Amino acid sequence: MKKQQRLVMRTVILLLLLAALGYTIYANFFTEKTAVAVGSTAPDFVLSDLEGREHRLTDYRGKGVFLNFWGTWCKPCEREMPYMNELYPIYQKQGVEILAVNVGEPKLNVEKFAERFGLTFPIVIDRQDQVLNAYGVGPLPTTFLIDKNGKVKKIITGTMTKEDIKQHLESIKP
């Protein structure tokens, strides 16, 4: 009888542990981690670009900001970068900035990537993942569309086509 009780108890404990593990996996990989909500003010930050110039998000007030979180190892990021680069000069003239936030990679890796694709928009490196965490970014690429008043208009997770990017840039023109 005691053997059977121990077996039942062990089975219950094992099932509880498996349920906890399943929930943890679900919560970390299949739910939105975004700490910034649509309609909220985008958290301010200061990051340096590849030339050492500081970029503060609030310096872009009055303009739309296409804030893109990415990594050099991220294939979907790699696919959308040329589209962003092609559209950047067109929309920059219309008051929209593209600001690409690299997720803490070595500067040399980011520079090589930027050179390979001839990227002309500002690229900043979030060395300590402070901005990544402040925005609650999960999978890459993740893009925040920020209007001229600094409010988050939309959050896009995953790769975008050229047409998607164009529509999003249009939506944040001042």
Image (tube, rainbow, N blue to C red):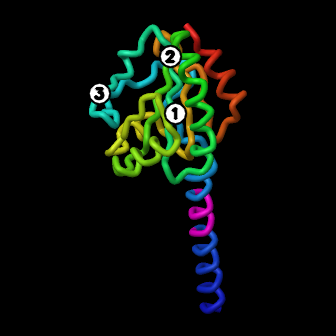
- Main SS category, magenta section: helix
Callout 1, which amino acid? Answer: Asn
Q: Position of residue 60 (x, y in %)?
A: 41, 15
Q: Is residue 106 magenta?
A: no
Circle nearer the viewer, 1 or 2:
1
Compare marks 1 and 3 and give the one earlier in the sequence: 3
| Marker disc for residue 54 | 3
Q: Position of residue 133 (x, y in %)?
A: 41, 40
The residue at which mark 1 appears reads as 68
Callout 3, which amino acid? Answer: Glu
Residue that appears at 39% across and 44% down: 111
Compare marks 2 and 3 and give the one earlier in the sequence: 3
Determine whether 104 is above or below 96 in the image: below
Q: Are marks 2 and 3 in contact (CB under 8 Å)?
A: no
Q: Are marks 1 and 3 in contact (CB under 8 Å)?
A: no
State the extent of the magenta-drawn residues as a range: 17-23
**126 and 88: which one is in front?**
88
Residue that appears at 44% across and 36% down: 101
Residue that appears at 59% across and 41% down: 32
Q: Are marks 1 and 2 in contact (CB under 8 Å)?
A: no
Residue that appears at 50% across and 28% down: 67
Marks 2 and 3, how far apart in space?
21 Å
Count the marks: 3
Horizontal placement of 58 versus 96: left or right? left
Horizontal placement of 54 versus 5: left or right? left
Q: Quadrant of the N terminus?
A: bottom right
The residue at which mark 2 appears reads as 151
Q: Quadrant of the C terminus?
A: top right
**151 and 113: which one is in front?**
113
Label 3 packing within 10 angstroms: few (<14), some (14-19), many (20+): few
Marks 1 and 3, how far apart in space?
17 Å
Marks 1 and 2, how far apart in space?
15 Å
